[in-house]
Amino acid sequence: MSMTSEDLILLMADSAENAIITTKEEFNITLDGSEESINLVDDIILSWLAKYKAVALEENAVFTICNIYGAYIGEIFRKKIGGEWKYDESDPDAPYVVLNYAGNSYAFAGVCYQRLVNDSEVSIQQYYRQAVSNNIQ
């Protein structure tokens, strides 16, 4: 799937908005696009497991959950620091999106995946803070 830069920008903005809407509908929690709201995402990711158990770990659910919240966090970073979304198809079986800024790539969806699937102790907020501190002198 080839995607223009403009298409990807729109997709990520829509995905971030989807995170806001879905979180309100599913958990009655308001994500307001602020840096402070990122700590809520840590809890929301685990709330998907609590509410939907194994269904939340099915491939399509994992993909959707991780990508909408990755987009949400990435859009906060992009608005504060900058960056450009990149669709990486180097592995055609597992394409992914990262946010590139100042020579670094940030896999916000990837850290959501780690918290959801592999280790509930992984902190999305901590990953975000580190990404910000890497770019503020």
Image (cartoon, grey):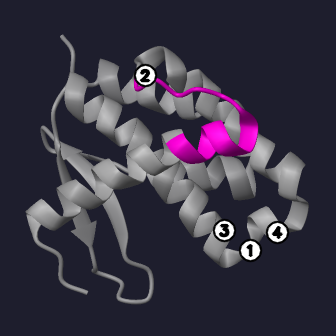
Residue position marked by numbered label 3 in the rendering: 61
**Which residue is at the front of the view, 87 or 105?**
87
Q: Amino acid at mark 4?
A: Val
Q: Do the residues bearing badges 2 and 1 touch, measured as CB atoms within 8 Å?
A: no
| Mark 1 → mark 4, Cα distance in angstroms | 5 Å
Q: Amino acid at mark 3?
A: Ala
Q: Which residue is mark 2?
A: 129
User: What range is drawn magenta here?
Assistant: 21-33
- The alpha-carbon separation of the residues under discs 2 and 3 comes to 26 Å
Count all numbered tags in the image, as a single digit. 4
Amino acid type at circle 2 is: Arg
Question: How far apart are labels 2 and 4 at the CA level?
Answer: 30 Å
Q: Is residue 119 left or right of residue 85?
A: right
Q: Quadrant of the C terminus?
A: top left
Q: Which residue is mark 4?
A: 55
Q: Which label sits in the foreground, 2 or 1?
A: 1
- Secondary structure of the residue carrying tag 2 is helix
Question: Which quadrant would residue 30 be assigned to in this image?
Answer: top right
Q: Is residue 30 magenta?
A: yes
Name which of mark 2 and mark 4 comes first in the sequence. Answer: 4
> Earlier along the polypeptide chain: callout 2 or callout 3?
3
Q: Could you tell me if residue 122 is visible in this image?
A: no
Q: Earlier in the sequence, mark 4 or mark 3?
A: 4
Pointer 2 and pointer 3: residues touching (CB < 8 Å)?
no
The dot on residue 58 is 1
